[in-house]
Amino acid sequence: MADKAKILVVEDEEILLAALKEELLTGGYEVDGAMDGLQGLEKVKSFKPDLVLLDLLMPKMDGMEMLQKLKGDSETRDVPVVILTNLSDYERISEALSLGAMDYLVKANYKLEDLLDKVRMVLARKQ
């Protein structure tokens, strides 16, 4: 049995963070969470996730800045990132994709089972 994939959820809305973590745990993943980009970067280094789910709009350091820092660091640049966004703001999304995010989910448009499918798909691509 392979080790469980580790997923870091970086999301500043506590209720959503808790729901995402719960769903991923139920899906059989090891999960940690962070409430902003600064905490998220620290957790990427300590928790060493196989995938980061990253909200764009957050205090202290937003998702774009965190993504740039992740991709600019040789230690973390290969960690796949899926953007979580409230925006159907395609400019921000395409900017995130061009910075190296692998995919995105618009929060209002997906159900939790879609989240698990997306996570499985991105992890499979990584192998």
Image (cartoon, rainbow, N blue to C red):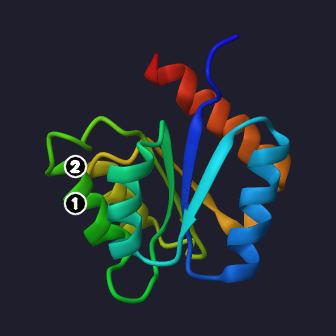
Against 12, is 24 above or below? above
Which quadrant of the structure image shows residue 33? bottom right
Do tag 2 and tag 1 residues touch (Cβ < 8 Å)? yes
Q: Which residue is mark 1?
A: 68
Which class describes the residues within 10 Å of circle 2: few (<14), some (14-19), or many (20+)? Answer: some
Residue at the image position 56 percent from the left and 72 percent from the top: 11
Q: CA distance from mark 2 to mark 1?
A: 5 Å
Residue at the image position 61 percent from the left and 22 percent from the top: 3
Residue 23: where, in percent of width, then height? 81, 52
What residue occupies the far front of the structure in this picture?
A: 46
Residue at the image position 59 percent from the left and 56 percent from the top: 32
Image-based side of 53 in relation to 27, left or right: left
Residue 43: where, in percent of width, then height? 41, 59
Q: Which residue is mark 2?
A: 71
Residue 66: where, in percent of width, then height? 30, 66
Q: Nearer the viewer, residue 114 or 11?
A: 11
**Image disc number at residue 16:** none
Q: Nearer the viewer, residue 56 or 73?
A: 73
What residue occupies the far bottom of the structure in this picture?
A: 59
Which class describes the residues within 10 Å of circle 1: few (<14), some (14-19), or many (20+)? Answer: some
Which quadrant of the structure image shows residue 5? top right
Residue at the image position 70 percent from the left and 38 percent from the top: 29
Asked which secondary structure carries label 1, the reply is: helix
Given the image, on which type of amino acid does mark 2 rest? Answer: Lys
Given the image, on which type of amino acid does mark 1 rest? Answer: Gln
Asked which secondary structure carries label 2, the reply is: helix
Q: Is residue 110 visible?
A: no
Against 64, is 51 above or below? above
Against 34, is 32 above or below? above
Q: Is residue 40 visible?
A: yes
Residue 37: where, in percent of width, then height? 37, 73
Q: Quadrant of the N terminus?
A: top right
